[in-house]
Image: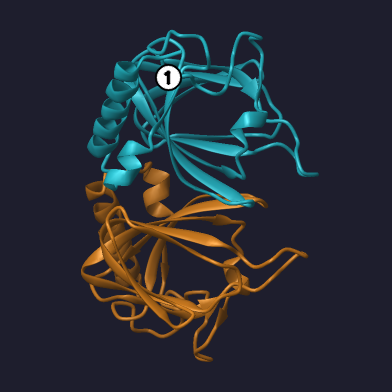
Chain colours: A cyan, B orange
Amino acid sequence: MITRDELREAQAYAAEQLATAGVVLTAAEREAIEVADFGLSRLREQGLMLLVYVNTDRYCAKELVLYPGQACPEHRHPPFDGMPGKEETFRCRRGGVTLWVDGRELVLRAGDQFTIPPDTLHSFRAGPEGAVVSEFSSASRDELDVFTDPDVQRATVVA
Amino acid sequence: MITRDELREAQAYAAEQLATAGVVLTAAEREAIEVADFGLSRLREQGLMLLVYVNTDRYCAKELVLYPGQACPEHRHPPFDGMPGKEETFRCRRGGVTLWVDGRELVLRAGDQFTIPPDTLHSFRAGPEGAVVSEFSSASRDELDVFTDPDVQRATVVA
C-alpha cells in the first residue's frame, strides 16, 4: 500500500527524470504514470514507476523509472494465449541499473541494453543515481507475472 | 545511390539529433546507423536514417531520424510467415513529422504518437526542424516492404 502523497511524489519524480532524459510527455501521460510498490509498502526500496507508450496484442513499449537504490522483485513472465512468455529488452537511458537474470549479474549504464528470454527469472535494482530504462517487448500482461516472494501483489493499493 | 560522404554526413547528423533528444548511443551504434535513400539518389528529399535497437522474431524498436523536409516514400508492410503485416507505433521525440495513413493526414510533434495497422499504406515527411521518431513494432522485415513508387529500392547502394 502507498499513500496518495507517495503516489504523487513518485509520479512527479518519474516525470522529472524522464524530462531530464529528453522524453517529452503529454499532460495525460504524466497523470497516467503507474507507481508499483508490489504490495510490500516500502516503495523507496521495492518498487517501480512505469509509463506505457503502447501495448498491443503483439508488442509493447514502456519507460521504467527507479528511485536511487529502488529494486523490482524477482519474477518471470510465463507463457499465455499459446505464446511463449513475454520477451523483453531493457535499454538504460540514464543512471544505472544492476540486472540479475537466471543467476547472472549485469550492470547497464546509459546506452547499454540486454534482452531477457521468456519465462526467465529476473530482478533489477537502480544504482545511487536512480535509473531510466526503456523496455521494448512482446505483448505485456503484468497481471500474469510470477514473483518469487509470495508476499508480492502486482496491483498497487493507494490508501 | 549515395556517396560515402553523404553516408558519413547523414550518420553524423542522426547521431547529433539523437544526442540532442537525450539518446545515448555506443560507438558501435553510431557506426551502425543505417542511411536509406530508397534507391532514388535524392537523400535530402527522399530518405531516412535508422538506428535499430532490437529486432527479434516478436518485436522491434528503432529510432528514425529525418533531415528537415526529408520524406519516407509511401509503402506498406505485407503479411509474412503466417502473421499479419508489421504493426508499428510512431512516437515523435523531437521536431515534427506529417504522417499520411490510408488517405488521412496527421501531424505529430514531440510527445505525440500514432499506431499504423498492418498492411496499410503510409508515408511521412519531417517538418522544417527535421524529426526524431521512435518506432515500436512487431517484428520488422524491411526487405518485404511494398512501395507505391516502382523506382524505389529498399537497399541503399553506397558509391
Q: Residue at x 30, y 75 (%)?
A: B70
Q: Which residue is drawn at 72% across and 68% down?
A: B80
When the figure is inspected, residue B104 is found, relative to residue B135, above or below; the finding is below
Where residue A51 sits, quadrant-wise, is top left
Chain of residue at mark 1: A
Farthest residue to the front: give it: A159
Q: On the picture, is B122 further left or further right than B142?
A: left
Type of amino acid at the residue the image marks with label 1: Val
Farthest residue to the left: give it: B128
Q: On the picture, is A115 further left or further right than A68?
A: right
Helix, strand or loop status at disc 1? loop
Where residue B66 sits, quadrant-wise, is bottom left
Residue A79 x, y percent position in the rendering: 75, 36
What is the total number of numbered labels drawn onto the structure image?
1
Residue B107 x, y percent position in the rendering: 30, 69
Circle 1 packing at 10 Å, graded few (<14), some (14-19), many (20+), is some
Closer-to-camera residue (A63/A155): A155
Q: Where does label 1 land, which residue?
A: A158
Q: On the picture, is A121 further left or further right than A55?
A: right
Does residue B1 appear in this view?
no
Does residue B122 appear in this view?
yes
Residue B14 x, y percent position in the rendering: 30, 58
Closer-to-camera residue (B57/A11): A11
Q: Residue at x 54, y 38 (%)?
A: A89
Residue B141 x, y percent position in the rendering: 61, 65
When the figure is inspected, residue B60 is found, relative to residue A45, above or below; the finding is below
When the figure is inspected, residue B26 is found, relative to residue A99, above or below; the finding is below
Q: Which residue is drawn at 44% across and 83% down?
A: B103
Closer-to-camera residue (A142/A76): A142
